[in-house]
Image (cartoon, coloured by chain):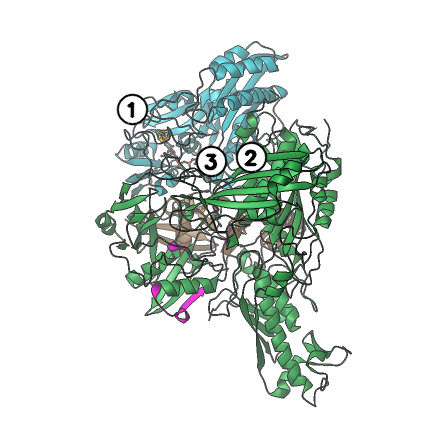
Amino acid sequence: MSFDIALTINGLHRVVAIDDPRITLLDLLRERLDLTGTKKGCDRGQCGACTVLVDDRRVNSCLALAVSLDGAVVTTIEGVAHGDTLHPVQAAFIENDGLQCGFCTPGQIMSAIGLIREGLAGDDPERIREGMSGNLCRCGAYAGITEAILEAQARMQLEHKGEAA
Amino acid sequence: MRPFAYDRPTTIADAVASGAQPETAFLGGGTNLLDLMKGNISRPARLVDVTRLPGLSTIEWLQDGGVRIGALVRNSDLAHDPRFANRFPSVAEALLSGASAQLRNAATAAGNVLQRTRCQYFYDAASVCNKRDPGTGCGAIGGLTRLHAVLGWSEHCIATHPSDFCVPLVALDAVVEIEGRAGRRDVPLEALHRLPGNTPERETVLEPGDVITAIRLPAEAAAYAGNARYLKVRERTSYAFAVVSAGAALRLDQGTIVSARLALGGVALKPWRARAAEDLLAGALPGATVFRDAAALALAEARPCGDNGFKIELARRIIVRALTLAAAGTPDRVPALPASPFALAPTQEVSAHV
Amino acid sequence: MSDITMPNVAAIERSRHGSSIGQPVTRREGHLKVTGQAGYAADYNPPGLLHAVMAVSGISRGRVTHLDVAAAEAHPGVVKVMTPANAPKLAKSPDDKDHGFMFRMNVLQNDSVRFANQPIAVVIAETLEAATEGVALLRPRYAEEPARIGLDGSAAFALQAVGAGAPAKGGIGDIEAGLAEAATRFEATYETPAQYHNPLEPHATVAEWDGDKLVLHTPSQGLTMAQGRIAGLFGIDPANILIKSPFLGGGFGAKGLFSGPQVLGIMAARFVGRPVKLVLRREQMFGPVGHRGETRQTLRLGADSTGGLTALEHNTLTTTSFYDDFFEPAGTTSRHLYASPAIATSHEGVRADIGTPIFMRAPGEAPGSAALECAIDELAVKAGMDPLDFRLRNYAEIEPITGKPFSSKALRQCYAQGAARFGWASRPRAPRQMRDDDGLLVGWGVGTATFPAMIFPSEARAVLRVDGSARVEIGAQDMGQGAWTSLAQIAADGLGVDYDKLDLEIGSSALPTGGIAGGSAGTATAGSAIHHAAADVIKKLAALATSDERSPLFGAGNSGVVPRDGRLVRQDDESRGESYASILARAGLAEIDGKGSAGPNPSMQESYAMHSHGAVFAEVKVDPDFGQIRVTRLVGAFAAGRIINPRMVRSQYYGGMIWGVGFALHEHAAADPRSGRLMNANLAEYHVPVNADVPLIEAILVEEHDPHVNVLGLKGVGEIGITGTVGAIANAVWHATGVRARAFPITLDTLLERPGDI
Ligand SMILES: Cc1cc2nc3c(=O)[nH]c(=O)nc-3n(C[C@H](O)[C@H](O)[C@H](O)COP(=O)(O)OP(=O)(O)OC[C@H]3O[C@@H](n4cnc5c(N)ncnc54)[C@H](O)[C@@H]3O)c2cc1C
Ligand code: SF4
Ligand code: FES
Ligand code: FES
């Protein structure tokens, strides 16, 4: 049984033949589409390393079946920078050292982008910490992650205002 | 993972028919089912993806003031729906205390209610388990039982139901709408999950093919909005299942409790409604003594099933606190750490006052 | 050669000149990591790749009697199942060890089972999905023997050596006499559980054989050791093995010794004659790749009427496997930390049907200082002293047992700066005195941090090019500590070139041996070799210049010139100099290279005790009724010699301190006492701290100059953070609640035994 599904991945429309319905979105990205930026830390929804945006919402790609996502818009870590210009969250992660080994980092950044988009945490660090608690960082880069999000969010708001003006 | 046939029906009738076939499972957000399939705990031959069924993704406000939560409404969407959070704050708080933001974005209302136990022995394919493989024995009894049930368990199964969402729902008389081969029916949430008894493998009253289409909260439930809390004790600050939790809601009239709603999580194989305690509270003035009496009553039948006796005392204390917090009034906004005892954000300064 | 050269992609916003060391430059590889381009082992997908998944044992002890290989091989996509019946025989027994830094391993050479989660077969398939299901279809049957589990599961026995070879016993003076004369005595037993490293990146191998040549992508904290281990097992020349490990998704010790599953990945590739990727499933990280052994530590202490220690006894019982030897050196901390006329430390071992424990972030010091810092605190309270004053009263001016001076020790400043920042002075002495506005109990605790300063043998190569750029090569590893950055900073300064004109190459076994990224010695180890390699280049360059009449440096003598910003200048007059480019050009050279090596310096080790130190202050809040604990504030002040990059060092301290939070409150592997199976072998239940567990954390980098420790004057920073933190938190929990928890992690039920407010 093979299913052709339509996916928009990082802005690119593509039809992907799913020859095995067991394939998760994570394994599709990593093993078949050569998008290995998204990481597998547990494969069971327990670490957040596989976080991507599906239809603009952050989800664990390890617990999403690819076949069920027909028509979805997927954004991965490979799709957030504009050419050489980093997304504000990416830049802020570097600046605030919100990473060490870097393995959780793609998931953290996608989760952070999702969190900022949700717009519910505001500039309350406690809400950010809670909202980011689905992303384990075994290296313990949490302080930098929280700082990075606060900083990036503020910058994005400024830019947004700038655009609106 | 066992290979499976994948079916994505577009009508509820088709879903029911497809789901009624042997070795079939419905796929909602997949965050529980896929996890179990990866662990070889569930090995369905067929998945029926219900996520494209029409009309099940909306929060519908009923004429009488009640609400109908479509089975496919995602946990996060429900919790963040302003009107819903306003009317049913303890449900929103419970939802937001569960899992992670990512999981809540995927998890559906029905899937959450039907998520299966996190009993470590159920989850470990190398252990025996009456629920997973009927008749093999209970692997947990005599093993690590710290987080197992203190109410309603049997010598065949001592597991608990892990859902946070269900706890305030059951307290508030939620009703589950089911579409099955015999048509539509309503089942009170309290009657959906079964206690283990001799048949721990029969987890709910659902029949093959039964699709949950919605969860309803009655208008009366909204009357508790001003005094409704969910409280969850866990072993790390976030992203952890409850050790024990409680949903408490009060209707107060001029300082007197007109009626109370109380349920516990993490103590039994179903969300545990504490009706006797509710009855005791009705008509009382809120206060430590009556709350303690209510807690004692709620746990009167409790007994440890191993090294988990502490959960009984913990549950009593949580009830008292949850009632106290409910009596104090629902906060305007769900706290930064939902349902956590650590509601206030830490600051650099701590005043050392005695 | 490794094709991963770190170009200057990182937007080094502050392009700088002059000294790189000490600058808080951002991570050199940061851009690659935040864009998903950093290639970890499992990200490599060569053409023709097959996927391998291990089947692991469901029992702790016995034999595998049956595997349904036919069912697995019948599954569409499965190529082959590798079992003890058909697995390639290794050139040497995986139980033969040439030295202590080797795991005995279980790699399908027989059907025995020595621990739960031991590999018992490998299924190789065209897809990951097929391989995974193939494993499920094997349905192993066993001849099971009763498992021996825990600290009481078998008889304890005496040990000669612990950890990396430290003597099991060590002390000075007469403990009984010291206790007899004490005005205050204290004795207690502390338990620490088995903990699992769980780097977020599970071990992965992508193995490609070409005849007798092997190319391997796998995370490794010690490339040369790994190469040697593989060469021995497969009977091939180490030169035929290329290991690439440019990025590790964390290691913490789990990727130090080459492990069985990594060997199985290589075997699988040979078995099927195709490239094979094998990635551990998370639950498989609980067993075959090491863990921190359980300990039971009994301490007896005495203090005189002024609070001076008269005796410190620290006895440890610790578990290891039945087939290998590694013993958590928990007692060694007590040999270094406090002054006492009588110190006795000893270790006993006990065997269990578990995978072999191994070094895990702050091996020995983490559990050892957890117990010691709690016991010291308890004694201080008994003696009626402030716990910080008590520690100062027992400050070790020299290393107590050896009598050696410290190469440097700014611990006093750590205590002072940490205490000031934290606000320790206003702490009430008695427990259960502080509440916050919510009625939560608040407690403050302190712990002393310590970790030895080590260095391992290593070599580096440096090249200066005529265009003014440079390149440094060393087979060092970056597992998140910042080696890509800090080694480049050291190299830039050594060569006198701009940081951004320097190419650094690390993470490949084809490079000069970079030693081990472990023991908090990675920067000292690789950095020192780089420093010497750079000096070698400069020396050669100076020789060219000073012997050439046409150079303004002619006659200055080799030692009379120093490197500055791409030039050699006269030491006595820095305005006189010549650029590298012109020296090389005149000599007709495109480039000039040098080599350097580093390693332990026995004479310094003879003369000095070398340790990093620190003080950690913790605030916890505890719900008075539920016993749920949250660490609401952590302040650590650490002195570790020279700081190469404060940004990266601070992150290392944070990481260690957060591990301290996990140690104190969360981490423990829960074994079923009957089967020995770990029932929480996953990241949902083996809790490590989440973001919300770490609200406020601060690290103070206390200035310290160490002229002795090594050529760079730097001590380790990677592990020390965990050491003081555990005790500080436990002591804060006591201060909040009045309950002394002596088993880690401290769980809420321990605190529930006290009546709550309710
Ligand atoms: C790491 C982790 C941590 C978690 N922590 C928490 C926590 O703290 N608190 C908590 O409450 N939960 C927690 N969860 C569980 C999570 O809430 C559930 O996985 C989720 O709610 C399930 O919803 P779903 O839509 O993904 O369900 P699915 O996985 O799709 O389905 C679950 C079950 O419901 C059935 N089903 C789904 N929809 C229907 C329908 N319409 N009709 C009939 N049957 C249906 C499925 O067949 C399946 O048996 C956690 C999960 C993970 C992985
Ligand atoms: S408690 Fe229930 S779910 Fe757990 S092992 Fe026993 S029977 Fe299975
Ligand atoms: S890999 Fe998906 S949550 Fe860990
Ligand atoms: S940076 Fe290593 S796990 Fe987060």
Q: What shade does chain C have?
A: green
Residue C58 locus on image (x, y percent): 33, 42
Q: Are marks 2 and 3 on the same chain?
A: no
Farthest bottom residue? C549
Label 3 sits on residue: B74
SS for tag 2?
Answer: loop
Q: What shade does chain A have?
A: brown
Q: Please, which chain is the residue tagged with disc 2 on? A: C
Answer above or below: position of C300 versus C579. Answer: above
Q: Amino acid at mark 1?
A: Ala
**Which mark's residue is nearer the viewer, 2 or 3?**
2
Q: CA distance from mark 2 to mark 3?
A: 43 Å
Taking the spot 60% from the left edge, 66% from the top edge, the residue there is C528
Asked if marks 2 and 3 touch (Cβ < 8 Å), the reply is no
**Which mark's residue is nearer the viewer, 1 or 3?**
3
Q: What shade does chain B have?
A: cyan
Asked if marks 1 and 3 touch (Cβ < 8 Å), the reply is no
- Which mark sits nearer the N-terminus, 1 or 3? 3
SS for tag 3?
Answer: loop
Answer above or below: position of C398 versus C352. Answer: below
Label 2 sits on residue: C742
Label 1 sits on residue: B182
Label 3 beta carbon less than 8 Å to ligand 1 = yes
Q: Amino acid at mark 2?
A: Arg
> Mark 2 Cα within 10 Å, few/some/many (few <14, many 20+)?
some
Q: Nearer the viewer, residue B252 or C263?
A: C263
Question: Which segment did they paint magenta?
Answer: C234-260
Taking the spot 52% from the left edge, 68% from the top edge, the residue there is C5
Residue C244 visible in the snapshot:
yes
